[in-house]
Image: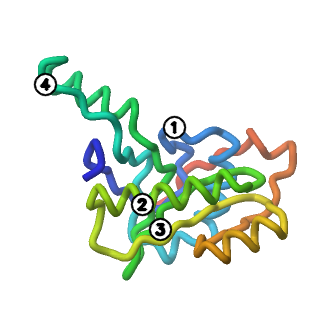
Amino acid sequence: MPVYEPTVVRPIASGDYPHMSKHDAVIWERFLQQYAPRIAGVAYDVALGGVVIDEALGDPASRLGWQYTTALKVDAVALLDRECWVIEVRPRANVAAIGSALCYVQMAKRDGFTSRPLVPVVVTDSTTPDIRYCAEQLGVMLLEVGETPPGEQLAGLGAAPAP
């Protein structure tokens, strides 16, 4: 299981995405505008793996804190009807984004995150034909949600829509 039980929330633009940079959040909100209707729920900052230290080295809370600190952190996990998207959000996606998505899926499998099929996903504003080719060959879903204009990078991190 992940280090801490993930909190699953509605897939809405809230501006509050734990540990996601402001640049990533702009891209993420574009993703939500396009894909939220397909998503049942989303968990942010899912910590997988991490170093488990010996009981003699601290109380349970301290040991769990150390494990969290050393764990791999998934930007977002989207729960769909029949599968689970393990998502890396990255401006100008590159090989590191593909590698992150692939590693996170392997960690989620090892940690027994879900019984649903896991899909490695990179959400980005732009990339290159070479990266698109590599993602396709490696089975990574690459979702480009439009390039971020410079003025929009830090502006307008969305408020949640009215109920």
User: Badge 2 is on which residue?
Assistant: 106
Look at the numbered discs 2 and 1 and tell me whether their residues touch, using CB distance below 8 Å. no
Residue 89 screen position, x and y as percent = 61, 53
Quarter of the image containing the C terminus? bottom left
- Mark 4, secondary structure of its residue: helix
Q: Which mark is nearer the camera, 3 or 2?
A: 2
Vertical order, 9 against 34 (above or below): above
Q: In the rendering, which numbered label is found on residue 55?
A: 4
Q: Quadrant of residue 63?
A: top left
Under mark 3, the amino acid is: Trp
Vertical order, 61 against 112 (above or below): above
- Mark 3, secondary structure of its residue: strand
Q: Label 2, label 4: how many angstroms apart (C-alpha)?
A: 27 Å
Under mark 4, the amino acid is: Glu
Under mark 1, the amino acid is: His
Does label 2 or label 1 sit earlier along the sequence? 1
Does label 3 or label 1 sit earlier along the sequence? 1
Residue 138 screen position, x and y as percent = 61, 72
- Mark 1, secondary structure of its residue: loop
User: Badge 1 is on which residue?
Assistant: 19
Q: In the rendering, which numbered label is found on residue 85?
A: 3
Q: Residue at x 80, y 46 (%)?
A: 152
Under mark 2, the amino acid is: Gln
Q: Label 4, label 1: how many angstroms apart (C-alpha)?
A: 28 Å
Look at the numbered discs 4 and 3 and tell me whether their residues touch, using CB distance below 8 Å. no
